[in-house]
Image (tube, grey):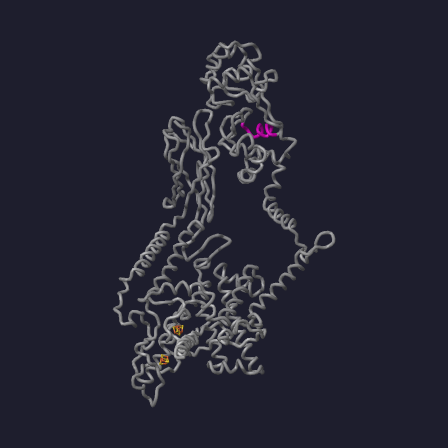
């Protein structure tokens, strides 16, 4: 009999725990309370970075858009720099840089990207801000949801959804503006003359902005976003995160007669940290995957602590080690951080190297394989090459080709001054002929050098092979 | 326990297995139902817009009249229209005029690769490098002359050179040996037999060949047959080339393409071939 009671007690404990383990699967809309505070301000400041996304396309540089990703023309313009497909290796370094930046920041201070910069959270923030302006506080919003459909409700809802869709459309339009001349594209949109690609992109962006920021919100972070999972595994015990100081807070209990009861911790169980959380979680259960580390609960708790006259920081940016009272490792002693920083530096060095060595002219030489060489009637050996000259400068260039590496060689097809058309590859077929006596090996390196006439600094060279019969 | 399995109290079939297992009869989630209905609606729409349902005489046509072959033809037409600006000019121009026009000859070099591959590469090699017994088109040595009109003539009418076995007259082993040695050295005229056996009639007084007859130059580094060894020269002298009287004769026939290809294609091939080597 006693045994049974015992078992039941164990099971009850587990049930109680599972009851706490409430995962929000989107059955209810989270209506988070907005509270002013340090982190709230920081969040707005960080979100303001996105203004660049909206305003960037209108910047001009000379007679063109300052930043233009010209996909059909296969070139990227970034202020004074033009990047052609041949330079995309730098793009991969840029991507690497940002990937590692994400890793290092996450390892140091948690999901800073999610909490402050991610378009999902920033747009959601703006959408809910609009919602609050129109519908009022979370309580009123919940009430409105339950209220019957009368004229006021319809009016409010229509305005809200219209605004949301407009923001979505503006997002989509702004996105497309990076890929074409902003002013021409606007003209296209306003006169309903834009291309199918453009309309399609705008439609997709509008729809998903509206759906994700308006309706799905934290559900995107929970179930769709891969970064949420990736970043989660970058934490370790030294990562500082918005965390509840359980030693200080527990036993939590309600404030009685303006006093914290004897033997109780600082948490007065007022639920404010839960009320403000945009993902609807309770940080007091510890770090969890639903937390986007937006730090809004810090503001909430701090304001409560101020009111009841306890020191701030019951919820604060702290590492697991710190909360457990272990000595914290210095940032630069953490191997993870060091590895990430090394990669970061290398990627950055590569990008800078690339940018400083963007040459205006590039030559590539392909050796004809079929046949590798040709015996000519005078006994000399001829090789055929296709010489591809890439001209990245904004003007056509007159080019001179010099081939070196074997005595007595003569060329045909590349003599005199050649034209390299601007912004693309011009290719020439060049025959190189060498008396058989000059060849000392089956293959000999020879160098093709191209030089722009009149501007010596525009030059490039490429080493290929000259192939002949076995001497 | 069973209430833990059904926390929201969804309706069940009413039957309980093993005390606490019940089958819920609630609807699948809304998004799932939306997906289900959207799917069959899409299939239906697809069947209306595209040919899909078996019907008398084949299948329904579909609203857009789309067909696979139609799409193929459309794509082909798009390619043709890009090429038209060049292709339209070619029929009215001579091969030498096309060769002289750098843009057109560039176009031909790029587009006639397929034509060359289909018609010429079997003997002359994919890159025109030749094969044993078939001439190399990349070098600067031409049996019938390397100017563009000669190439057009070669492709159109074909070629069949002729060299009689043993110079058409009797030759002894010793004579053949002696003549072959001189030829293999690249100095055919050094042998008195070159004049005596009338080799000069085709190969020229200086041994440098004659384009009109397709008789090769015997003094340069390039060999029409074999590698230029005494053995291979001896074989050629002994059995001749295309000599109907000698069953072991060397064969050398360039077929006639005039009745297989149209004039424009032949011009294209000629330009392509003449651009293969430095010429
Ligand atoms: S806001 Fe602070 S005091 Fe209030 S419940 Fe949360 S942790 Fe406790
Ligand atoms: S628990 Fe705090 S930091 Fe985490 S998402 Fe909620 S409010 Fe933001």
Q: Is residue A246 magenta?
A: no
x then y, percent, for residue A346: 33, 54
B149 falls in the magenta region: yes
Q: Is residue A64 above or below residue A302?
A: above
Image quarter of residue A46: bottom left
Q: Main secondary structure of the magenta part?
A: helix
Q: Quadrant of the N terminus of chain A?
A: bottom left
Q: Nearer the viewer, residue A103 or A467?
A: A103
Where does ligand 1 appear, by image quarter?
bottom left
Please state if A328 lies on the left or on the right of A81 as rendered.
Answer: left
Which residue: 65% across, 49% down? Answer: B69
Q: Which residue is found at the position 36% from the left and 77% from the top?
A: A299
In the rendered structure, the answer to whether residue B120 lies left or right of residue A106 reads right
Residue B32 found in image quarter: bottom right
Question: Looking at the image, which residue is at 47% across and 45% down?
Answer: A425
- Magenta-colored span: B146-155
Identify whether A169 is placed above or below B160: below
Q: Residue A334 in the image: x percent, y percent?
A: 29, 62
Residue A387 rendering spot, x and y as whole percentages: 45, 40
Residue furthest toward the left? Answer: A327
How far from the left and from the top, in percent, is residue A242?
35, 72
> Can residue A235 be seen at all in this image of the molecule?
yes
The residue positioned farthest toward the bottom in the image shown: A257
Residue A186, placed above or below residue A468: below
């Amino acid at each position: 009999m006693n045994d049974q009671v015992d078992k039941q007690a164990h099971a009850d404990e587990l049930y109680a725990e599972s009851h706490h383990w409430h995962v929000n699967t989107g059955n209810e809309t989270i209506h988070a309370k907005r509270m002013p505070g340090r982190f709230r301000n920081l969040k707005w400041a960080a979100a303001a970075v996105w203004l660049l996304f909206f305003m960037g396309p209108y910047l001009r540089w000379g007679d063109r858009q300052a930043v233009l990703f010209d996909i059909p023309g296969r070139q990227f313009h970034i202020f004074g720099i033009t990047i052609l497909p041949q330079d995309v290796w730098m793009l991969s370094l840029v991507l690497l840089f940002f990937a590692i930046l994400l890793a290092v920041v996450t390892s140091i201070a948690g999901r800073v990207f999610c909490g402050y910069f991610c378009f999902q959270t920033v747009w959601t923030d703006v959408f809910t801000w609009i919602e609050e302006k129109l519908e009022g506080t979370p309580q009123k919003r919940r009430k409105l949801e339950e209220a019957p459909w009368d004229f006021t409700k319809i009016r409010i809802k229509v305005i809200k959804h219209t605004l949301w869709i407009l923001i979505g459309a503006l997002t989509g339009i702004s996105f497309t503006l990076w890929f074409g001349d902003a002013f021409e594209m606007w003209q296209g949109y306003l006169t309903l003359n834009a291309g199918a690609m453009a309309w399609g992109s705008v439609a997709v962006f509008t729809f998903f902005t509206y759906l994700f920021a308006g309706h799905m919100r934290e559900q995107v972070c929970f179930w769709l976003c891969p970064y949420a999972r990736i970043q989660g595994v970058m934490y370790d015990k030294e990562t500082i995160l918005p965390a509840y100081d359980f030693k200080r807070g527990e036993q939590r209990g309600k404030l009685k007669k303006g006093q914290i009861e004897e033997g109780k911790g600082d948490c007065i169980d007022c639920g404010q940290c839960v009320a403000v959380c945009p993902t609807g979680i309770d940080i007091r259960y510890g770090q969890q995957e639903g937390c986007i580390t937006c730090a809004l609960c810090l503001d909430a708790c701090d304001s409560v602590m101020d009111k009841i006259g306890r020191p701030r920081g019951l919820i604060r940016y702290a590492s697991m080690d710190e909360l457990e009272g272990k000595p914290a490792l210095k940032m630069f002693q953490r191997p993870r951080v060091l590895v990430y920083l090394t990669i970061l530096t290398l990627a950055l060095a590569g990008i800078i190297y690339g940018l400083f060595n963007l040459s205006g002219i590039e030559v590539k030489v392909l050796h004809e394989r079929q046949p590798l060489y040709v015996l000519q009637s005078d006994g000399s050996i001829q090789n055929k090459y296709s010489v591809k000259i890439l001209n990245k400068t904004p003007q056509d260039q007159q080019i001179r080709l010099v081939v070196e590496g074997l005595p007595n060689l003569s060329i045909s097809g590349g003599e005199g001054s050649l034209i390299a058309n601007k912004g693309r590859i011009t290719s020439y077929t060049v025959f190189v002929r060498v008396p058989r006596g000059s060849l000392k090996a089956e293959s000999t390196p020879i160098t093709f050098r191209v030089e722009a006439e009149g501007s010596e600094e525009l030059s490039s060279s490429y080493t290929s092979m000259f192939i002949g019969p076995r001497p | 326990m069973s209430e833990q399995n059904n926390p929201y109290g969804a309706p069940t079939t009413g039957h309980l297995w093993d005390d606490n297992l019940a089958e819920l009869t609630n609807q699948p989630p809304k998004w799932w139902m939306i997906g289900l209905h959207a799917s069959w609606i899409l299939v239906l729409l697809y069947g209306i817009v595209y040919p899909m349902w078996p019907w008398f005489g084949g299948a329904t046509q579909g609203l857009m009249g789309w067909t696979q072959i139609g799409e193929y033809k459309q794509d082909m037409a798009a390619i043709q229209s890009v090429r038209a600006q060049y292709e339209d000019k070619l029929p009215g121009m001579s091969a030498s005029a096309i060769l002289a026009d750098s843009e057109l000859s560039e176009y031909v070099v790029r587009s006639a690769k397929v034509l060359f591959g289909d018609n010429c590469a079997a003997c002359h090699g994919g890159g025109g490098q030749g094969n044993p017994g078939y001439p190399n088109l990349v070098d600067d040595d031409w049996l019938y002359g390397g100017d563009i009109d000669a190439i057009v003539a070669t492709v159109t009418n074909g070629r069949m050179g002729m060299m009689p076995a043993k110079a058409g007259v009797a030759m002894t082993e010793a004579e053949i040996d002696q003549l072959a040695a001189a030829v293999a050295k690249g100095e055919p005229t050094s042998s008195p037999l070159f004049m005596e056996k009338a080799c000069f009639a085709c190969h020229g007084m200086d041994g440098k060949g004659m384009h009109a007859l397709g008789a090769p130059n015997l003094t340069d580094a390039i060999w029409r047959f074999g590698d230029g060894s005494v053995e291979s020269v001896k074989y050629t002298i002994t059995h001749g080339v295309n000599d109907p009287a000698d069953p072991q004769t060397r064969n050398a026939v360039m077929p006639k393409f005039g009745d297989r290809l149209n004039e424009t294609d032949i011009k294209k091939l000629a330009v392509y071939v003449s651009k293969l080597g430095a010429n």
